[in-house]
Image (cartoon, grey):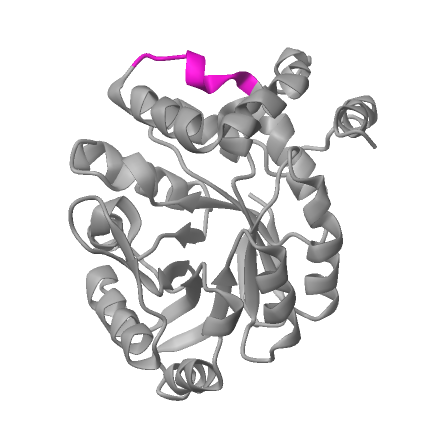
Amino acid sequence: MLYRPLGRTGLTVSEIGFGCASWWGKPAFAEAEALALVHAAIDAGVTVFDTGASYSAGEAEPRLGRALKGRDVSELVIATKAGTYHAGGGRIARDFSPAAVTASAERSLKNLGLEVLPLLQLHGPAREELTDELLDALEGLKARGLVRAVGLNSFDPAVIEQAISLPAFDVVMVDYNVLRPEREPLIARAAAAGKGVLAGMPLAMGHTGLQVAKLRDPQDIWYAARGLLRHRREVLQGTRFSFLHRQPGITGSQAALAYVLGNPAVSCAVFGATRMAHLRENLAASGMALPPEVFARIRRAQGR
């Protein structure tokens, strides 16, 4: 596993991180399998584990806490999110008030069994929700020694642009993959401003390999339904990149990760996994170079 600096936070992170969300955090996914994936990732040198208070109907964060119990967490960068929470009935509610974000961070510490959160990220705030009072509260969490670094996760470029301009934010998390080349100037500006950059969805949700059509287990059905319901455009776009899965010496997932990690402004690419083979395949992408001819073909498929 290779490592990169996380902006100017003083933290060093594995260039590949493990996302603890979605099916991984649900009770329907066996606890023993979920914990084994985290332990295997740690043993392979992964230091970034990304979760959130609202993920998996509120179940992912405490499950990650159980996975970390008894492990040496001193070198791990556990990242969680505040501002959204599970409100029951499958609903996700929002509250970016200073009091709510502070209370969320304090609950996260208990759920994760940590004394300090290495990284607390706001989960999809709107620009108008980034008030001076909220920024003061985030600085207050740092001053109390409860949070080391503060970040923001958003799919809205305007929100990321605002975060780049605000000293309160140390890290930004953006959706970056072969389907999202338009994020590259934004990522460059974030890195130039000293922000750490986490790449979310680096595998483009498996759409380059048409994973929605490969149904073997309950999680496949769940992910396929979510993809067809929320991401039909991306499913169609992904078919233009099916060639990634026909390259010698590199799998499609590894090629997708190599593309993201080929951007030196990216600190870490975070993906999720519910199969050990999938985890190991993707971790092997650390240090892989994307063949120039494959990169050129990606650019052509992106319309460059």
Task: Check the image and report above or below for 225 versus 8.
Answer: above
Q: How many marks?
A: 0
Left or right: 23 in relation to 178: left
Give the residue drawn at x 37%, y 30%. Answer: 226
| Residue 303 belongs to the span the image colors magenta | no
**Residue range corresponding to the magenta coloring:** 209-216
Where is residue 86 drawn, in percent x and y? 23, 54
Residue 78 in view here? yes
The N terminus sits in image quarter = top right
Q: Residue, x 39% and y 46% (percent of image)?
A: 42
Q: Tell me the quarter of the image containing the C terminus.
A: top right
**Residue 41 percent location from the top left of the image:** 40, 41
Q: Residue sitting at 19 percent across and 55 percent down?
A: 87
**Apparent side of residue 217 relative to residue 262 in the rendered image (left or right):** left
In this rendering, does residue 244 appear at all? no
Residue 9 lies, in percent from the top left, at 57, 72
- The quarter holding residue 255 reads top right
Farthest-out residue, front: 128
Q: Quick check: is 213 in the magenta stretch?
A: yes
- Is 286 in front, or is 150? 150
Q: Which x, y percent locates residue 47?
A: 45, 53
Vertical comparison of 285 with 208: above or below: below
Instruction: Determine the image quadrant of residue 22.
Output: top left
* Residue 157 sits above or below residue 216 on the image: below
110 vs 289: above or below: below
Q: Nearer the viewer, residue 300 or 75?
A: 300
Q: Which residue is depicted at the point 21% across and 44% down? A: 90
